[in-house]
Image (cartoon, rainbow, N blue to C red):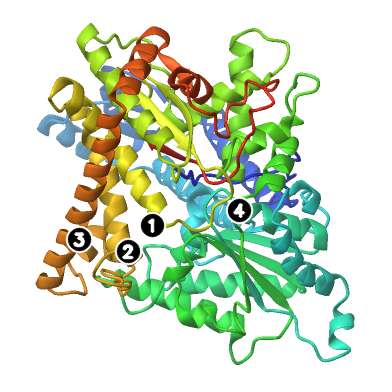
Amino acid sequence: MKKETGKGEGPKKRRNPKMSQKGPNALWLLLALLVGGMFYLFWYNSVNRDVKTVSYSKFVSMVEEDKVEKITVQDNYVYGALRQNGLQFETHIMPTEKLWELLASHNVNVSVIPIDKPGWGATLLLLMMLSFLFFAVLFYFRQGQGGGGGASKIFNVGKSKARFFSPNTVNVTFKDVAGVDEAKDDLQDIIKFLKDPKKFGRLGAKIPKGVLLSGAPGNGKTLLAKAVAGEASCPFFSISGSDFVEVFVGVGASRVRDLFVQARKHSPCIVFIDEIDAVGRQRGVGLGGGNDEREQTLNQLLSEMDGFSTEHGSVIVLAATNRPDVLDNALLRPGRFDRIVEVPYPDLKSREKILQIHASRITLKPGLDLLRVARGTPGFSGADLENLVNESALSASKADKQFVEIGDFEQARDKLLLGAERKTVVLSEKDKIQTAYHESGHALVNVLLEDADLLHKVTIVPRGRSMGASWSFPEEDRHIESVDLMRAKIMIALGGLLAEKLVFDTQSTGAASDISHATKIARRMVCKYGMSKLGPIVFGNNTDHPYLGRDIMRHSADYSEDTARKIDAEISDIITSCYNSAEKLLVDNKGKLEILAKGLLEQETLQAKEVYHLLGMKLRKFHSLTDADDPSDELGDGEVRPIQAG
């Protein structure tokens, strides 16, 4: 089972440069003055306000003595001044008709303020608060223009989100990228051009405008882009394809324009777009109106890469994707992405180099052979190998070991392939016996078939979702698969089911995943590889709708119902033929099945070497990492595929 997560990276860490930002000192000073002035006004008003508070009876007496010149009334509050010295006073009254007559008879000037009308103090406070709010918004707006966050992000929604790295700030080089020698050779032209553009222009050669890194996840596409930036020592912009996507119409195209405007200011430079399939998918295949926004973004990207006013050689675009099949043809044509560089799974030598890089960060047992580990991990990506090294170090740490040993790598590999052991699951005696015969059926068919992959291990210890497992590895690097090999895989998949029927005359649900696995192989043989009586024809190769879901695509087959019936019949014939062949193998070797099942019940886990020894058969090449002293223990290489987990 091929794993596709992450990417292999070197031990060095990238240092992210931080662009210096000058704070808005003048604005801070203005805000400080505003707050200080507001506190001063409150203080001045409270200190210099010479107002005497009098009782209601005293107020009436002053009116009767003709001492009061004028008053201002607001609800029950009275503010007034005396005739002789102008002394101010305040009091609270109960407005009555007699009081108004008294004020009128003594010629007191009366002013009335409505209840909802604030005084001058409240008005001043409100103005100050509004001024403070205005300057706060202005401050955040200016911060947003300078690259900060805050409430002003809405004003910068059309700005590019690309991260800028100045020259000599990326510490990753090609020395940190193990393997992928062909990809590094293809990228050397770009590095040489950025270092010496005149060398290429001397003979009229033009450097590629764009390079597309294509490959399965985890093989180091992003790491290669970092290494190019580190080797070239030139300005570098990094952005993800999803960073162009936004809910607002026109934002994606605006961000593309802004990105290339910035890039041309620092030319010659590199722009790296990771996961470009998020924005570069084929046009005209969307299901909703939102697709128009994505197409506008793609159109702008096409124009910037090779438009009417594009300056050649000023900006080199690197992009990475694991779905080159869904990209728009206009994006892949020469003049935009001139080169498509494949980043494949690492071979044996590359895996050894990747392991050396990651193992340099842990404490290995002296003399540990990483080449042996590399041989036992065929089909692992760089990210898988990094995870393997980390899991082995965790395993050694749990056991309080001083070094990471070869056995820790073995445990880590098995854990990554099929999951950790489920020690809390307790099988009944009946289920344990049935599981032992089931897994023995897989393993026995595996060792009896010459065209099958190498048996690695068989166990009845629950792992992951399975109650037991039997899995194998290819003998060597494999790039093609024959009909015999695919039929052998189907026979091995059906071995557990057949063993249960042969011994117990019954069938359990434990064979569900085996049947599904066998059916998928048979369907690929008929529909994809032309390995049936229908001839070398591909059925169901519908790639016209990259945005449609898989279930929708499945119902839009490009063949008739009559052809579908023939396909089902061919799949059934292949399964039936393999079923009968595997059944004959087990019937003829029922004694070996009994021996193997009893051995499993006793030991629970058997390595391939132990299986061959129990059956009295000659040992084939072996994938165990633990028996280094056995001269017959030769490790193969190829693609990892756990055959059965029943």
Residue at 31% across, 12% down: 425
Q: Earlier in the sequence, mark 1 or mark 4?
A: 4
Residue carrying label 4: 143
| Amino acid found under the numbered disc labelled 4 | Gln
Q: Check contact, mark 1 vs mark 3: CB within 8 A.
A: no
**Where 334 sits versus 252, above or below?**
below
Query: Mark 3 to mark 4: distance in Å?
Result: 68 Å
Residue 304 position, x and y percent, is 58, 80
| Amino acid found under the numbered disc labelled 1 | Val
Tag 4: Cα neighbours inside 10 Å, few (<14), some, or many (≥20)?
A: many
Residue at 47% across, 21% down: 616
Q: Which mark is residue 570?
A: 3
**Does residue 463 appear in this view?**
yes
Residue at 84% across, 71% down: 192
Residue carrying label 1: 483
**Where 228 sits versus 627, above or below?**
below
Residue 158 position, x and y percent, is 50, 67
Q: Which mark is residue 555?
A: none
- Total tally of numbered discs in the picture: 4
Q: Check contact, mark 3 vs mark 2: CB within 8 A.
A: no
Q: Earlier in the sequence, mark 3 or mark 2?
A: 2
